Image (spheres, rainbow, N blue to C red):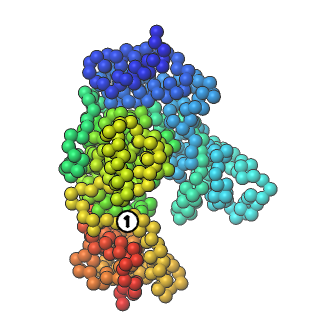
């Protein structure tokens, strides 16, 4: 009888083959595993990964059904482990394990709503007690705040103050915050995220676990092989992807829930998924049962000049990877993260399809990958050699020095083989990678670092407005821009009005705005309005068609523009 370790190695070696012999072998191995006791957490986790892989990329319905049946037994297998061995599975998201991390406010509300007894504030991992105290004080009365923090630890004080029928401190705090007036609720949610509230989530057999989280598929697509890019990425990305639909609210809500769960169980998060917009969820069919879900952000949580989206990759309903994309003018910052169980599948092809979808949705002409995605402060990316994944597809360093280093290392690898030294990968990760499409123009580049200077530019502009209140000064600038652009916000939605009010002062930084042609001023008014549209796609696409705004703004922020005067006078 082979050992469990030997069986798992055999399964790993055959899982990505789809010929009839391989399917028989998979079924045989799964049958042998069914009666085995897996006493080592590392082996159990590896077997769990294989089961997920077989569900996402099935070669036969019988093997897929057998894998699903064994996933249903994972929680019992984890519970059978001694406590010290169960602890080794922490933060994996596997059913029966525990995840501990700082959780965003909307995700905390979801989890507490589902499993109020299973999730609690993790006092042992509070990193910023001052921020946590500030958060708790928001739900207290004035009299309570007078004594809060004096003579008693926060933990003891809360234990005495919370409702006696609350299932946990976390539930009490969330519910107390949610019952505040509307504006105060927003302040509470913001304070929550600043406090980085740590939780301990006993996942159990939750449908949000990595083990069980997926979208049900009535007719799974069976695999015969894995696809690879059959043409240069530039040609692939330029071809429109027509199979993209905007989901209706019920389907969108389900997609958002699966995306949030895929990240929460693994102790990860993406801002766009935390504050997901159920009115803007796009579904792209990538073929062979693979799908891309692109999730927009609620109007109240959007970035200033960038659009912002999270995305989830699925195969036969199983989450297999995720990332984000932030279109800015004619470029988009993005990256891909494939979950560990699905390495060795068809990541390169799916990434090519994903970029194709982004081009189709937003009309961008350059893709940017920041250094973190392939190693800057990211040991996982260094270990996986993520840099070469992007490089092989045609991404190139933004700087000349980075290009020289990459070309030299690529030539060495061709001669000698092997892997790049860790030190070299760290050097390669010091700058961004770019991938330019044929219609990209160097004049379209917008330095992302300039986004950090928008606030400084506006501060200088407000210093010339004879109003003491900064908010009132920004309102003055917005009204001046409104007059210049001929905008009629009274006919717009509340979100569109708020977006215009927020963005118009930025437009006031442009000294030449009064001299713009009327048609371009009208186009700018529609761009600023579109920031508050139901979805951000309209904003992203309009941005690509208004180069004057972004080029003049980039010039001003770089310090080469004219000094700001009164634009309407």
* Residue 245 can be seen, yes or no: no
Residue sitting at x 24%, y 40%: 229
Q: Is residue 379 left or right of residue 171?
A: left
Residue bearing the label numbered 1: 447
Q: Which quadrant of the structure image shows residue 345?
A: top left
* Residue 167 can be seen, yes or no: yes
x then y, percent, for residue 90: 56, 35
Q: Is residue 496 left or right of residue 542?
A: right
> Dot 1: few (<14), some (14–19), or many (≥20) neighbours within 10 Å?
few
Q: Which quadrant of the structure image shows residue 337?
A: top left
**Depth check, front residue: 453 or 95:** 453
Residue with the most extreme right position: 151
| Rendered position, 500 above or below 220 | below
**Depth check, front residue: 519 or 109:** 519
Residue sitting at x 46%, y 49%: 426
Image quadrant holding the C terminus, namely: bottom left
Residue sitting at x 38%, y 36%: 418
**Depth check, front residue: 253 or 69:** 69
The local secondary structure at tag 1 comes to: loop
Residue sitting at x 33%, y 47%: 391
x then y, percent, for residue 349: 28, 40
x then y, percent, for residue 448: 39, 64
Q: Is residue 314 left or right of residue 195?
A: left
| Rendered position, 215 above or below 195 | above
x then y, percent, for residue 20: 26, 18
| Rendered position, 473 above or below 187 | below
Residue with the most extreme bottom position: 569
């Amino acid at each position: 009888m082979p050992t469990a370790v030997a069986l798992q190695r055999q399964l790993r070696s055959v899982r990505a083959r789809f010929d009839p012999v391989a399917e028989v072998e998979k079924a045989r191995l799964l049958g042998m595993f069914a009666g085995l006791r897996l006493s080592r957490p590392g082996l159990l986790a590896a077997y769990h990964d294989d089961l997920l892989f077989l569900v996402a990329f099935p070669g036969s319905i019988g093997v897929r059904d057998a894998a699903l049946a064994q996933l249903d037994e994972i929680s019992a297998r984890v519970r059978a482990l001694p406590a010290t061995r169960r602890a080794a599975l922490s933060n994996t998201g596997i059913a029966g394990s525990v995840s501990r991390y700082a959780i965003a406010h909307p995700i905390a509300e979801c989890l507490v709503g589902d499993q109020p007894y299973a999730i609690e504030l993790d006092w042992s991992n509070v990193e910023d007690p001052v921020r946590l105290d500030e958060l708790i004080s928001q739900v207290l009365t004035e009299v309570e705040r007078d004594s809060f923090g004096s003579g008693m630890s926060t933990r003891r004080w809360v234990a005495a103050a919370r409702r006696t029928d609350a299932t946990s401190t976390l539930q009490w705090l969330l519910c107390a915050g949610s019952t505040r007036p509307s504006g105060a609720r927003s302040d509470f949610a913001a304070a929550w995220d600043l406090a980085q509230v740590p939780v301990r989530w006993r996942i159990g057999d939750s449908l949000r676990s990595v083990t069980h989280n997926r979208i049900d598929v009535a007719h799974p697509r069976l695999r015969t092989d894995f696809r690879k890019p059959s043409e240069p990425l530039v040609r692939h990305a330029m071809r429109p992807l027509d199979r993209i639909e905007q989901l209706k609210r019920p389907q969108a809500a389900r997609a958002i829930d699966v995306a949030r769960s895929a990240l929460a169980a693994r102790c990860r998060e993406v801002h766009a998924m935390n504050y997901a917009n159920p009115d803007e969820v796009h579904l792209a069919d990538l073929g062979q049962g693979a799908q891309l879900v692109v999730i927009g952000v609620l109007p109240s949580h959007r970035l200033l000049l960038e659009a912002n989206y999270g995305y989830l990759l699925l195969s036969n309903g199983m989450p297999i990877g995720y990332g984000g994309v932030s279109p800015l003018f004619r470029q988009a910052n993005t990256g891909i993260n494939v979950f560990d169980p699905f390495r060795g599948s068809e990541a390169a092809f799916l990434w090519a399809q994903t970029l194709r979808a982004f081009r189709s949705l937003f009309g961008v002409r350059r893709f940017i990958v920041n250094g973190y995605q392939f190693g800057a402060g990211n040991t996982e990316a260094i270990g996986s050699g993520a840099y070469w994944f992007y490089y092989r597809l045609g991404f190139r360093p933004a700087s000349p020095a980075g290009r020289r280093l990459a070309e030299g290392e690529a030539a060495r690898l061709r001669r000698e083989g092997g892997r790049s030294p860790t030190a070299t990968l760290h050097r390669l990760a010091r700058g961004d990678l770019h991938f330019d499409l044929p219609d990209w123009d160097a004049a379209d580049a917008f330095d992302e670092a300039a986004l950090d200077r928008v606030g400084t530019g506006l501060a200088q502009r407000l210093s010339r407005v004879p109003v003491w209140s900064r908010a009132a000064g920004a309102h003055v600038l917005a009204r001046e821009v409104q007059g210049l652009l001929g905008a009629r916000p009274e006919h717009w939605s509340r979100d569109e009005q708020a977006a215009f009010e927020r963005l118009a002062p930025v437009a006031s930084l442009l000294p030449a705005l009064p001299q713009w042609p009327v048609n371009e001023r009208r186009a700018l008014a529609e761009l600023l309005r579109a920031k508050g549209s139901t979805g951000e796609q309209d904003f992203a696409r309009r941005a690509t068609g208004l180069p004057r705004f972004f080029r003049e703004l980039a010039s001003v922020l770089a310090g080469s523009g004219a000094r700001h005067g009164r634009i309407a006078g």
